[in-house]
C-alpha cells in the first residue's frame, strides 16, 4: 500500500469515526457530559439582598451603603471549559487481540469526548505522547479542528515507543495557562506514575481513561510462544500450556491493574476502564454518572 493510499484509508476511518461519534453524542452523551463538568470560574451576575447563610465575603459594601441593608453579589458558573485529550501512542497502543487496537479505541473515545465538548461550547485540544511529548495542539472549536485531532492520534509514529506519563503531565502543567479538564487516555503500562499524576491532578481536573486488552489479563492455552514487548523489543519464549505460568501471569497483571487504580483513587482522579473487546460507551456513561452523583451530593 502506497503512502497516499494509507492516508486515504486513514481519512476514511476518521470520517467513519466522525459519523459514529456525532450519533452517540446526539442520542445520549451530550447531556451527561454537560452535567458532569463544572466551569472553571465564576462570572458576576447580579445583586440580591443578604440572606441567612450567605457568605460574608460576597457582601458588596458599596451597594449595602446605598440601599441601607446588606446586599451580596450573585455569580453564575463560567460554562466554557478548556478540554485537553492526552493520548498515549506508545508501542503498546497498537496492540489489539480482538477487533480494534488500543489506539483505535482511544481515537473513538477522543472523537466522542471532543464532539461532546464542542456541542456544549467548550474548546478542545490534544496532547500526543509516548516516551516524550510528540505534539500539543491548543484548544479550539470547530469540526475541522476536531477531525484533525482524531487524525493525528491515528497517524502518530513515535521514534521512541516507550511510555512516559511524567512527560505528558509535565507538558500539560507547564503549557496550560489556566485550570483545564484533562482526559488522560493510556494503558498506564509505565513506571513512575505516582508523582506525575498527583501534580497533574493538583492543577487540572484530570480524568484517567484506561484501555486494556483481554490477553493482557489472562493468557490463553496456546503452547510455546514468543512474547515481545512492543516498547522495548525485549523477547521471551514461554509455554502457555503451563497452568502455573498462566496463573502467575494473571496474578502479576491483576497486581499491576490494582496498583494503578489505587494511585488514581489516592489523587482523587476519576477514571473509566475501556477494553479493545467492547464498546467504550457504557464505561464512559458510568464514569460520567459517578461524577454527576459526586457533584450533587
Image (cartoon, rainbow, N blue to C red):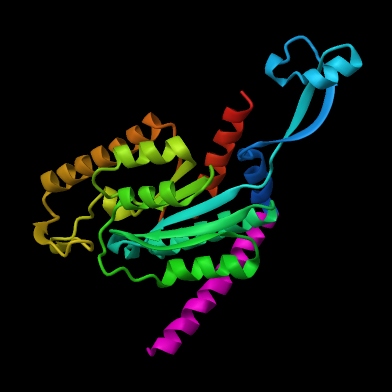
Screen quadrant of the C terminus? top right
Bounds of the magenta segment: 1-26
Image coordinates of residue 97 in percent, x first then y, are: 32, 62
* Magenta residue check for 21: yes
Q: Is residue 22 depicted above or below 116 in this figure?
A: below
Q: Residue at x 15, y 42 (%)?
A: 248
- All told, the count of numbered labels is 0
* Magenta residue check for 227: no
Of residues 91 and 62, the one nearer the viewer is: 62
> In screen coordinates, is 234 left or right of 184?
left
Residue 192 showing in the rendered view: yes
Image coordinates of residue 245 in percent, x first then y, are: 12, 47
Residue found at the far top of this picture: 52
Q: Residue at x 17, y 43 (%)?
A: 247
Name the main secondary structure of what is drawn in magenta: helix
Screen quadrant of the N terminus? bottom left
> In screen coordinates, is 49 left or right of 259?
right
Image coordinates of residue 113 in percent, x first then y, are: 57, 54
Of residues 51 and 160, the one nearer the viewer is: 51
Q: Quadrant of residue 259?
A: top left
Amino acid at each position: 500500500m502506497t503512502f497516499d493510499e494509507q492516508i486515504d484509508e486513514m481519512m476514511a476511518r476518521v470520517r467513519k469515526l466522525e459519523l459514529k461519534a456525532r450519533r452517540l453524542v446526539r442520542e445520549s452523551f451530550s447531556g451527561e457530559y454537560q452535567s458532569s463538568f463544572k466551569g472553571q470560574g465564576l462570572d458576576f451576575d447580579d445583586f440580591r439582598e443578604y440572606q441567612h447563610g450567605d457568605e460574608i465575603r460576597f457582601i458588596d459594601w458599596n451597594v449595602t451603603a446605598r440601599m441601607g441593608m446588606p446586599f451580596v453579589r450573585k455569580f453564575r458558573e463560567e460554562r466554557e471549559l478548556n478540554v485537553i485529550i492526552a493520548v498515549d501512542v506508545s508501542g503498546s497502543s497498537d496492540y489489539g487481540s480482538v477487533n480494534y487496537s488500543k489506539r483505535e479505541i482511544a481515537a473513538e473515545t477522543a472523537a466522542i469526548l471532543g464532539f461532546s465538548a464542542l456541542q456544549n461550547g467548550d474548546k478542545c485540544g490534544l496532547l500526543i505522547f509516548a516516551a516524550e511529548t510528540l505534539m500539543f495542539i491548543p484548544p479550539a472549536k470547530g469540526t475541522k479542528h476536531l477531525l484533525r485531532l482524531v487524525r493525528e492520534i491515528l497517524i502518530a509514529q513515535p521514534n521512541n515507543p516507550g511510555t512516559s506519563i511524567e512527560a505528558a503531565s509535565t507538558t500539560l502543567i507547564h503549557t496550560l495557562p489556566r485550570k483545564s479538564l484533562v482526559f488522560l487516555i493510556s494503558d498506564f503500562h509505565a513506571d513512575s506514575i505516582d508523582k506525575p499524576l498527583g501534580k497533574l491532578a493538583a492543577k487540572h481536573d484530570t480524568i484517567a481513561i484506561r484501555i486494556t486488552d483481554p490477553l493482557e489479563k489472562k493468557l490463553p492455552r496456546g503452547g510455546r510462544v514468543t512474547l515481545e514487548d512492543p516498547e522495548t523489543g525485549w523477547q521471551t519464549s514461554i509455554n502457555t500450556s503451563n497452568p502455573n505460568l498462566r496463573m502467575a501471569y494473571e496474578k502479576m497483571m491483576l497486581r499491576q491493574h490494582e496498583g494503578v487504580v489505587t494511585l488514581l483513587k489516592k489523587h482523587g482522579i476519576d477514571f473509566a476502564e475501556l477494553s479493545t473487546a467492547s464498546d467504550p460507551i457504557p464505561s464512559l456513561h458510568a464514569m460520567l454518572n459517578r461524577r454527576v452523583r459526586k457533584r450533587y451530593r
